[in-house]
Image (cartoon, rainbow, N blue to C red):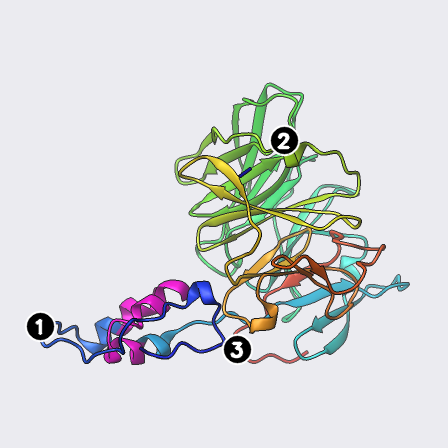
Amino acid sequence: MCSASPSSLFPEDLTVKPIVQALPAPSNINIPSDLLREILSRLGLKANIHASLVCKTWFQVAVSVRKLQPHPWLFYPLKGEANGDYILLDRQRSQAYKLNFPDLKGHGFSCSRDGWLLVSTNFPSYLVFFFNPFTREYIYLPEAAPTSGYCLTFTAAPTSSSCLVISLNDRSICSYIEIATWRPGETLWTTHRFENLLPGRRWKSCVFSNGVLYCLTTFSNIGIFDPSRATWNILPVEPCPAFFQVDLGRRVLMTEHEGDIFVMLTSRNKNPLMFKLNLKRNAWEEKRELGGLTVFASHPTSLTRAGLSVKERNRIYPSHNGHLGVYYSLGDGIISSRFPTSNYLSNRIAWVDPPHNNFNL
């Protein structure tokens, strides 16, 4: 092992079927409506659905504040163009927008979150900047020392006070691990050095969840950086044999959903494998289905969604140059069509969250 009638919009694992119909709120439970709305608005989708089954009053309030994440859009360079032309694709509506961003030519994306992309380049100097393809905004970070690191991520939009950029430099042959952090408004990066507890291991992917950064090696080791305490630790996770298989075309991708950590082992020539990190047992568990979740996989960041349509559940949608409808169904092992051989999960192609408010392209 390495009621309320719930709408069909929600996956079975996120839907709790009550034994009896919802009853009026008991007279001894009297939570002010404003307070109840505030409490339920802070819940994730799964917890919101559970709370909606308490009674009719809770159901009405829970539905009114229930947050459904929109489908992510695909952002990629126009094939054959060398002048910075990009496509921003709304896959759900099959709408594509051609946009020009000359400053992005040749750059790779390191992370995607809240509609923003974190862009990095090593030539002519190591440069990191935020870019929003919807608003066309750029936010440049201070210059940093050159890095061979693979783990570069951020926790929230750069316009948010909770934004933190984290870079882990891959110095596998060194005696130390170097992690640099930056917050909006700072003029310099803050560097932390820790003892390298896994010399020779390469850090290949990362994801921010539960307030900490989870970093993964190709041998299934997990390192955790806690920015609030400035600490670095290695979880005692049992090795997973599937991670040791050599495949030059493999991409190792991480994603998370409400605190759960997932890893995908992907390849053009093999079906993807999905694993979930069991934090209680410190072990990897292979998943044959996703509990109704949908994963939009890309090399910069893989985005996870709950509550999509029935046909989209338990699927992995890989990023590539604009092909619509290509997916892998984890539940039944069906691939909709042959995955493309070019730009498959390239670091120049990313899924991005669309803005919640109106915008003009």
> Label 1 vs label 2: CA separation?
55 Å
- The stretch of residues the image draws in magenta is 37-61
Amino acid tagged 3? Asn
Q: Is residue 357 left or right of residue 110?
A: left
Which is in the foreground here, disc 1 or disc 3? 1
Q: Residue at x 46, y 41 (%)?
A: 278
Label 2 element class: loop
Q: Which residue is mark 3?
A: 357
Amino acid tagged 2? Phe
Label 3 element class: loop
Amino acid tagged 1? Asn
> Label 1 vs label 3: CA separation?
40 Å
Task: Reply yes or no: does residue 41 show up in magenta.
Answer: yes
The answer to whether residue 186 shows anywhere in this view is no
Label 1 element class: loop
Q: Residue at x 63, y 31 (%)?
A: 219
Task: Reply yes or no: does residue 82 show up in magenta.
Answer: no
> Label 2 vs label 3: CA separation?
42 Å
Q: Residues within 10 Å of mark 2 (few under 14, many from 20)?
A: some
Residue at far top of view? 175
Looking at the rendered structure, which numbered label has been put on residue 61?
Answer: none
Q: Where in the figure is residue 337, as x and y percent of width and height?
A: 79, 64
